[in-house]
Image (cartoon, rainbow, N blue to C red):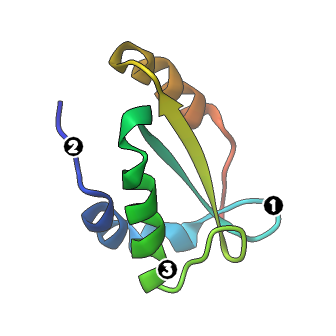
Amino acid sequence: MMSVGPIGSTLRHKKALGRLRDRGGLARIGFLGLAFERTAGEWLRAGLRDLGHVEGTNIIIEWQWAEKVDQLPELAAELEGRPVRPA
C-alpha cells in the first residue's frame, strides 16, 4: 500500500482545493487514516494552515478514521460518495 505524506500531498493538490467547493463556497477535502495515526491529521492541518487554509474558515475537512486496515475500503467509498460541487 502506497502512502503519501500529508504535507507533500497538500502541496501537490493545492490547485485542486480551489476547484472543490461545497455549497457555501468553502473548499472541501477528504482525509482517510488509521485511528492510531491521528497525528497525521495535525500535520495536514499545519500544512494547510501554512498555505492559508484554516479548517472551518475557508476549508472543510471530511475526516474518516479506521480502527482496522480492513475498514479503509468502506470508509474510502463513503468519502468518495460525498458530494462536492466544482467551482
Tag 1 and tag 3, C-beta contact below 8 Å: no
Q: CA distance from mark 2 to mark 1?
A: 30 Å
Q: Please determine whether, in this image, residue 26 is positioned above or below residue 38.
A: below
Three-letter residue code for mark 1 = Arg
In the rendered view of the protein, which quadrant contains the C terminus? bottom right
Q: Which residue is mark 2?
A: 3
> Upstream in the sequence, badge 1 or badge 3?
1
Q: Nearer the viewer, mark 1 or mark 3?
A: 3
Q: Is residue 68 left or right of residue 78?
A: left
Q: Is residue 40 left or right of residue 20?
A: left
Q: Is residue 22 left or right of residue 3?
A: right
- Residue sitting at 37 percent across and 13 percent down? 70
Q: Residues within 10 Å of mark 3 (few under 14, many from 20)?
A: few
> Upstream in the sequence, badge 2 or badge 1?
2
- Residue sitting at 42 percent across and 84 percent down? 50
> Upstream in the sequence, badge 3 or badge 2?
2
- Location of residue 30 in the rendering, given as x and y in whole percent from the top left corner: 53, 48
Q: Residues within 10 Å of mark 2 (few under 14, many from 20)?
A: few
Q: Please determine whether, in this image, residue 20 is positioned above or below residue 70.
A: below
Three-letter residue code for mark 3 = Arg
- In front of the other: 27 or 51: 51
- In front of the other: 17 or 42: 42
Which residue reaches farthest right? 24
Q: Nearer the viewer, mark 2 or mark 1?
A: 2
Q: Which residue is mark 3?
A: 49
- Location of residue 76 in the rendering, given as x and y in whole percent from the top left corner: 47, 29
Q: CA distance from mark 1 to mark 3?
A: 22 Å
- Location of residue 56 in the rendering, given as x and y in whole percent from the top left corner: 71, 68
Q: Which residue is mark 1?
A: 23
Three-letter residue code for mark 2 = Ser
